[in-house]
Every structure is written in structure tokens, then in C-alpha cells.
Amino acid sequence: MMHPGNVQRRRLNRGGDRQANAVLYRIALSRLRWDARTQDYLARSLTQGKTRPETVRCQTLHRPRNLLGDQQA
């Protein structure tokens, strides 16, 4: 398996709140299991060549933006 050296990934703040990061990860996993929209997103991203861990990482980053947007509206 090849590992490209120039891959830039956005990650959660490793110096931040570990409990909050763990909760966001669990939310992403439960949404992948139960939410139809998130399952569709997983299927689309897998056809685009992303891996499941990459998709979970994207969901973990995306969900807080959705929550903040819902609170502001």
C-alpha cells in the first residue's frame, strides 16, 4: 500500500478538549449507523475513492459546524 507524503488532512484540535472530541466521534459513528443521509454520504464518498476512516474524520469535523449553524438560525 502506498502512502503519499503530501496528504493534508484537517484534524480535530489535538490540544483541545479530549472528551468533546470523543463525543463528536461517537456522534459521527452513530449517525453513520442510523441516519439515512449520513449513510448516503458514506456511499458517495466511498465511490469517490475515500476510505471509511476518512469519511468518519470528515463527519467528525462537519457535525460541529451543523450544530453551530442550527443554534445560530
Image: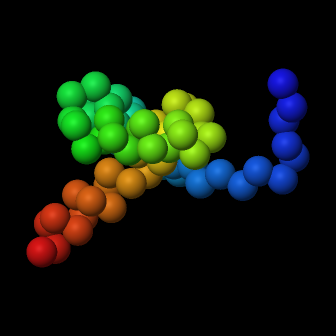
Question: Does 68 appear above or below 22?
Answer: below
**Considering only vertical position in the picture, is 6 above or below 57?**
below
The answer to which quarter of the image holds residue 40 is top left
Q: Where the C terminus falls, by quadrant?
A: bottom left
Residue farthest to the front? 47
Q: Nearer the viewer, residue 21 or 30?
A: 30
Does residue 61 show up? yes
Toward which corner of the image does residue 23 lie, by quadrant?
A: top left
- Which quadrant holds residue 71? bottom left
Q: Position of residue 16 (x, y in %)?
A: 48, 48
Query: What coloring was used for the rendering?
Result: rainbow
The image position of residue 8, as x and y in percent, is 72, 55
x and y, in percent, of residue 11 in the image = 57, 49
Q: Residue at x 33, y 61 (%)?
A: 65
Q: Residue furthest bottom?
A: 73
Give me the residue at 62% from left, 40% from top.
49
**Taking the image as drawn, is residue 21 in sight?**
no
Residue pictured at 76% horizontal, 50% vertical: 7
